Amino acid sequence: MDWTMRINRAIDYIEENLEDDIDLKYAAQLACCSLNNFTNMFLVTTGIQVSEYIRRRRLSLAALELKNSNEKIIDIALKYGYSSPTAFNRAFQSQHKVSPQYARSRGGPLVTYPRIFLQIKLRGDIKMKVRIEKMPSFTVVGIKKSFRNDSVANRIPDFWSDTPKETYEKLVSLEDSNPKGLIGLCADFDGINTFDYYIAVATTHPVPEGFVQYKVPAATWAILEQDGDLWDLHTRFWQEWLPSSGYRRAKETIPDVEVYPDEDIVKENCNYELWFPIVKE
C-alpha cells in the first residue's frame, strides 16, 4: 500500500471518531508503523502535532454545531471531549477568539480547520545527497536532556548553544569511532509526548563523570547530506525520499542521528548529515 494512502487511512479513522475516544496506537497500526513514527510523520508532513490536529478539528465541528443547532453548549462540549464548561470555554476562545456564548448569540466569523488529506509532491528538480550504509552497533557518550514533542523546534537549538565550550572540548577529546564528528541523537521516545536528546560523540572510552552513554543498535541507514537548514532536510526525507524509496523507517528503538563532521556547528549553514534507520518495505 502506498505511503500516503496509509497515512490517509489513519486520518480517516481520526475523522470518523472525533466525537469519541481516539486510539492513536490503532491509528498508527492503520498507517502500518509505530506510534512514534506515525506522530513524527504526521508532524513533518502537516506541520502540526496529531494531537493539535484533533483539537482543532473537534473545536471546528463544535463551532459549526453552535451556529447550526440548538444543542446546549455543555452537551456540545461533552460531545467533543471536554468534561467541564471551563475547559471548553478556554479551548474555544483560544481557537476562535470569542466565547461559545458569544459565538452563538452574536455570530461572526469563526476559525475552522478542514480535514487534512495528504498528497505528496515529489520534487525531482532539487537534488538530494543520499547514501545507504549498513553500520554495526556503536556507542555514544555525551549529555542529554528531555524534551516534549511540541517544543522541539525552539528548544533543541538552545540546548546546543547553552552547552559550555568546555563540554564540547571534552567530547571532541573522547571521539575515536564512526560516525566522526559531534552527534545529535533523538532517542527514548515514549510514543507521543517526550523523548531524550543527546549531544555526544561516538567513542569506546569509559564514561566520564557528568556524562551519559547510549548504545545505538546495528542498522541500515539512509544518510542525507546538506549544508544549511536542518529542518528542511528532515522534512524532505519524510515527504520526498521515503515515500518513493521502497523503504520504511525502522522501529523506534533505533534513534534518528544528526552528524556534524566538522565539529563546529555554532555557525550558520554548517555541513551536516541526517541518519535515518530504514528497512525494506
Image (cartoon, grey):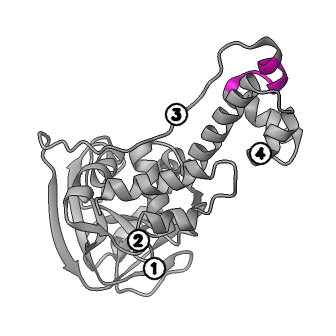
- The answer for how far apart the CA atoms under marks 4 and 3 are is 19 Å
Quadrant housing residue 221? bottom left
The image position of residue 229, as x and y in percent, is: 31, 43
In the image, 95: left or right of 247? right
Asked whether the beta carbons under mark 3 and mark 2 sit within 8 Å of each other, the answer is no
Nearer to us: label 3 or label 1:
3
The residue located at (22%, 58%) in the rendering is 224
**Amino acid found under the numbered disc labelled 2:** Pro
- The residue that label 4 is drawn on is 79
- The answer for how far apart the CA atoms under marks 2 and 1 are is 10 Å
- The answer for how far apart the CA atoms under marks 1 and 4 are is 45 Å
- The residue that label 1 is drawn on is 214
The image position of residue 184, as x and y in percent, is: 40, 63
Asked whether the beta carbons under mark 2 and mark 1 sit within 8 Å of each other, the answer is yes
- The residue that label 2 is drawn on is 255
Q: Secondary structure at mark 3?
A: loop
Asked whether the beta carbons under mark 1 and mark 4 sit within 8 Å of each other, the answer is no
- The residue that label 3 is drawn on is 114
- The disc, 1 or 4, on the residue closer to the chain's N-terminal end is 4
Asked whether the beta carbons under mark 3 and mark 1 sit within 8 Å of each other, the answer is no
**Amino acid found under the numbered disc labelled 3:** Pro
- The disc, 2 or 1, on the residue closer to the chain's N-terminal end is 1
